[in-house]
Image (spheres, rainbow, N blue to C red):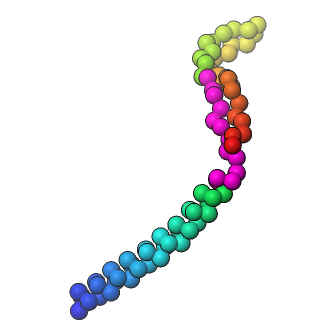
């Protein structure tokens, strides 16, 4: 009896997962088509620079990282 329940359960789970994969595959296909039609953005080129601590007049400025954009993002085909 337990074996029969286990077989029915396994068949139900396997069948359910198969139908989910089909639905998921269709949505992936449509998203790939959308991505092929739409332009994408390129990644920007960023440089990380360490700025040492300094005193300016009455102000003490701790050392910190500064990020400098060397090339901004652009549209690509």
Residue 14 magenta-highlighted? no
Residue 27 placed where, x, y %? 58, 66
Q: Residue shown at 50%/72% (left/top)?
A: 22
Q: Residue shown at 65%/24% (left/top)?
A: 67
Residue 46 magenta-highlighted? yes
Tell me where residue 71 sits by quadrant. top right
Residue 47 placed where, x, y %? 61, 23
Q: Which residues are magenta?
A: 35-47
Q: Is residue 46 above or below residue 40?
A: above
Query: In this rendering, would 49 be left or right of 77?
Result: left
Nearer to me, 38 or 55: 38
Residue 54 placed where, x, y %? 66, 10
Q: Residue shown at 60%/22% (left/top)?
A: 48
Q: Is residue 65 above or below residue 74?
A: above
Q: Quadrant of the C terminus?
A: top right
Q: Residue shown at 63%/58% (left/top)?
A: 33
Q: Is residue 51 above or below residue 71?
A: above
Tell me where residue 5 sits by quadrant. bottom left
């Amino acid at each position: 009896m337990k074996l029969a329940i286990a077989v029915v359960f396994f068949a139900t789970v396997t069948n359910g997962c198969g139908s989910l994969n089909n639905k998921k595959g269709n949505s992936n296909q449509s998203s790939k088509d959308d991505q092929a039609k739409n332009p994408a953005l390129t990644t920007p080129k960023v440089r990380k620079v360490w700025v040492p601590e300094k005193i300016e007049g009455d102000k003490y400025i701790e050392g910190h990282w500064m990020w400098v954009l060397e090339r901004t993002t652009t549209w690509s085909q």
